[in-house]
Image (cartoon, helix red, strand yellow):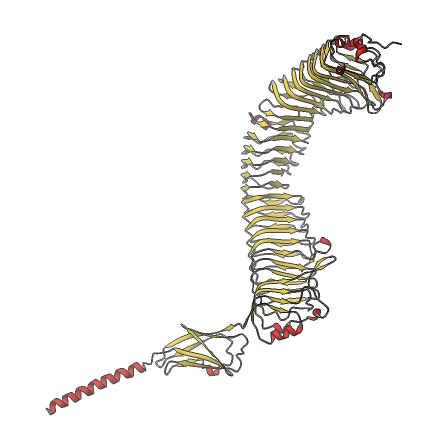
Amino acid sequence: MKINNLIYVLLFALVCFITGCEDDDSLFSGDENYITSFRLIEGEHVYAGCIVGDSLVLSIPESVSLENVEVEFTASENATLDPDPSTISNWEENRTFTVISYNRSQRIYKYMVVRTLVAQAGDVVLTTPEEVEDFASRGINKIEGNLVIGKFTGTVKEDTLTSIASLSSLKEVTGKVTINPTYGGVSLDGLQNLEKVGEFMMVTRSTQYGNAGIQNLREIDLSHLKKVGSDLIISADTLYSLNLSALESVGNNLQFEVWDVKNMDFGALKIVAGNLSFPGRHYYGGGNTYLPEQVEFPHLETIGNQLELKNPHRIKELLFPALISATTVSLEQTDVLEKIDFSQLREVVETLTLQWTHRVKEYDFSQLQSVGGLRVYYIADLEKINLHRLSRVGTGGFTIDVCNKLNDLDLAALTEVQGNFVLAAPADLNALKEVGGNFTFSANAESFDGLNSLTSVGGNFALSGTAKEMNGFKALTTIKGSMTLNNMNNVTCVNGFDVLTSIGSGLSISNMGKVEKILFLANLQGAQFAQCSFSQLPALQGLDVSGFSISKLTINDVGADFVLRGNSELNGEVTLSSSRGIRFDGIEKVQTLSVTGFTQKDPAVFNFAGLKQVDKLTVNLGYVTENAAALCFPDLEEVTGLLTLSEGSNGSFKQIEPVQLPVLRKVGALTYTGVIPVLELPALESVEGEFRVSTSYQNGPVRMLEEICVPNLKKVGGLVLTTSAYNTNSYNNLITDLSCFSALESAGYVNIQKQAALVSFEGLKKVINKLEGEDSWTVSENAYNPTFEQVKAGELVKQE
């Protein structure tokens, strides 16, 4: 029994010993190295820290000073901290603490301070010094609303707000900061610690000369401002220094309405989501601004909408070395600007416009690949443009024009222009395949052989230049608009256009003094033209238009003995003028023919042999002085419509040759004016409509017809004799009778007037017998004016 009791006691003691050892081990292992809590004590205020993983975060209000404060830490049992918190006097700095356990294992904590802003909800309006000081005394760091400084208009008393320096604790305004015109300070000291605003605007004031900015303001230091959520508008007439060195982003527009600013710092700006513009001050409707000699945005990568600089002064360098993309870029009227850096610009979504930037010698767009539209215009000193990666231009089109010194233009990668294309400079364009709009190019080189990949032009095509040899365009098949070749006075033969088969509306070739051949016309078989014009081509000897149809064909000032070849029937309007001789070959019928304006020094013969029928014929010899053209239609038998003959337009000039119509038998209607003595139509038999002749013409000395020769004329729809004279002294006084119409058998009506010597109507006896009614007979201002009853009664001759 005693032995058993002893055993029980020993077992109980062993269990207690084992249990005691386990409890001691759970209370202290020697491995733990944690910070379990920490807090900051500042006077009566206690700020508890937050432990997040291995980070120690102390969040305290912005206004709390960390000088002479106490910080308490609690750590694992028998653990030590390095450095010892009691040795630290500056708790503003971020640092690390190493916690060392009893058995020397380590854990590292990162300590950081996070300042929390003291916020006030609602708008704050500060218009007087008292209101500024009262607000500043509250230590507000954040306004959850708008901040308004000054008034839009006010009295002298209200204009006494000249300082806001006491607002230096302010770091954020969630809404809009407005600086009104009544603010009279020379700086914005007090806002220098602003880090973030929803919007910032300086309001202009109206004057008799236009809008004006804040007066007296000389310096703006917003060196801590990092973000503006919407617009940032600087409008200050007297501003000379602007510090936005920390600004990283502007959510909408960044605009500078300044007059004369000498220092600007945008060292951190990366993005402007809206417009970046320098409109200047708009007195009297103009925009002027004096900027520093160098304006640089070293880190600006993106402009969401438009970059605009117009009419700046003093600035010599405008640098955007990091800019990658913008929607629109527009630089205009920069009087002394010499250097522009867009070396990293890759894309302009809409239009890139550079015009009147006269002193810039080189544009480097070596990274630009795509642009909605490009316009480089009238830059006097421009010599080089690097666009060697540009492959696509959108519907805004491509224009480089009036840059007379430009001789180095790299467009080797350009394949597509969706809009219009205008180029007046030499360039390698052999990669260009398609132009969606109009194409205008000046081939200013000794010889031209290029654009051999271009297959189609969606609009009009215009080519000019100084080249002596013209080739190229060997892949061009289609021009959807019109085609114009002009002002290439050194070219003798237009080659190229080997596969051109379609021109949409018209063809014009002009002002090419040496061109003798136009070879590509042979390719246009079956083409239909609304209009074709060949003008000022004095060396051109002929054209063959038999392969295509033309609604309107104009030929002016071509070579002597020019031959126009065509199909037997030429449907359309043909106008011939100011040439030294034109002949038809193969053409028998023309719908409308106008021969006009022949004033030349050399005699000209227009022999339209083979032409038998014209629907409408107009001949106007114009103001011929001498060596007048001799127009001959030896085979013309019929003009189905109106025949208009105007043989001379000035009576003081040398007598001209009459138009020869030897076999013309039938005319739809006829109108005649001129300065020749005899109107001769020997074969004419009938005029279905009106036969109208002006027997005297006054433009300078009066010229009068002496005779009308129509011996075979039997029928007219109506007979009209009149004059183009201004007064009775200029009426025709040479024609005394109408025996010239003795063969005439019928006329629907007769109207004879202003024949001052006409005393006999016997030549119209056959016609008078068939007239019916007084309305068919009109005579006036002649030497003899018998009534209808008189002529019906046979009183055809004036009785003495």
Count the marks: how many?
A: 0
Instruction: Quarter of the image for the C terminus: give it.
Output: top right
Most extreme residue toward the left is 1
Depth check, front residue: 397 or 405: 397
Q: Against 388, is 476 above or below?
A: above
Q: Position of residue 539 (x, y in %)?
A: 68, 26
Q: Against 74, is 521 above or below?
A: above
Depth check, front residue: 635 or 427: 635
Q: Position of residue 463 (x, y in %)?
A: 63, 35
Most extreme residue toward the bottom is 2
Judge from the rendering whether residue 80 lies leftward or rightward of residue 189; answer left or right: left
Q: Position of residue 223 (x, y in %)?
A: 60, 67
Q: Against 353, is 738 above or below?
A: above
Q: Against 793, is 248 above or below?
A: below
Depth check, front residue: 102 or 742: 742
* Residue 594 picture quarter: top right
Q: Is residue 342 visible?
A: no
Q: Is residue 616 visible?
A: yes
* Residue 630 picture quarter: top right
* Residue 448 picture quarter: top right
Q: Position of residue 155 (x, y in %)?
A: 72, 68
Instruction: Quarter of the image for the N terminus: give it.
Output: bottom left
